[in-house]
């Protein structure tokens, strides 16, 4: 086991990292960075600076290179998030079709600012770059897995009720 200020690379995590690294030629093990970060996030719910350092050490990369990956992709949480992470596309095509208004509506309904988490830990709301469904705007992604289209205020309200009842 190895540790960096609050994050421990357990034998189980190391074995999972090893399986991902084995998919690449030995001289290209840095290619497993996204998979290793996904493993960390699945394990602890987010990717801390300490875990980035452990991944960097494991893969033989500069820590800043791992941090760049973490902060570039919306799927990695650089801080703890709520049970439901709501990413609303605010890229130009979606913004022109009320994506920014959808984000504002969710924030207002939940009483948070963008990137904020509700006091009960249920919801985190954040803007997102292009989700690749411009014709369906406004679009959003729930928990990095479920894409929803044509999200009017009424549909957003229905979604919040559904998610609240699912908790």
Image: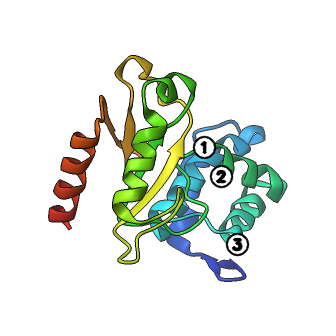
- CB atoms of marks 1 and 2 within 8 Å: yes
Q: Which residue is mark 1?
A: 73
In the rendered image, which quarter is residue 40 located in? bottom right
Residue 166: % across, % down: 17, 62
Q: Which residue is mark 3?
A: 50
Q: Is residue 27 left or right of residue 22?
A: right
Upstream in the sequence, badge 2 or badge 3? 3
Q: Which residue is mark 2?
A: 70
Q: Between marks 1 and 3, how big is the CA–CA gap? A: 18 Å
Find numbered disc 2 in the image and state the secondary structure of the residue it sits on. Answer: helix
Task: Name the image quarter holding the N terminus.
Answer: bottom right
Please rate how many residues cluster around mark 3, counting C-alpha atoms within 10 Å: few if below 14, some from 14 to 19, many from 20: some
Q: Nearer the viewer, residue 155 or 36?
A: 155
Residue 11: % across, % down: 55, 73
Q: Residue at x 58, y 57 (%)?
A: 17
Q: Between marks 1 and 2, how big is the CA–CA gap? A: 6 Å
Q: Between marks 2 and 3, how big is the CA–CA gap? A: 12 Å
Q: Nearer the viewer, mark 1 or mark 3?
A: 1
Q: Nearer the viewer, residue 111 or 120?
A: 111
Q: Residue at x 74, y 38 (%)?
A: 28
Task: Name the image quarter holding the C terminus.
Answer: bottom left
């Amino acid at each position: 086991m190895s540790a960096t200020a609050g994050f421990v690379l357990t034998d189980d995590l190391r074995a999972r990292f090893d399986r991902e690294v084995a998919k690449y030629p030995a001289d290209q093990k840095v290619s497993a960075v996204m998979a290793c970060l996904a493993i960390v996030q699945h394990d602890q719910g987010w990717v801390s600076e300490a875990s980035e350092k452990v991944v960097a050490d494991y893969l033989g990369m500069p820590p800043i290179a791992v941090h760049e990956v973490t902060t570039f992709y919306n799927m990695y949480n650089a801080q703890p998030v709520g049970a439901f992470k709501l990413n609303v596309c605010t890229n130009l095509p979606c913004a022109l079709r009320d994506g920014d208004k959808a984000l504002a509506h969710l924030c207002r309904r939940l009483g948070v600012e963008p990137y904020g988490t509700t006091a009960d830990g249920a919801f985190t709301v954040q803007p997102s770059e292009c989700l690749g469904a411009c014709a369906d705007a406004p679009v959003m992604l729930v928990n990095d897995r479920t894409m929803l289209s044509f999200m009017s205020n009424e549909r957003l309200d229905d979604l919040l009720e559904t998610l609240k009842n699912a908790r």
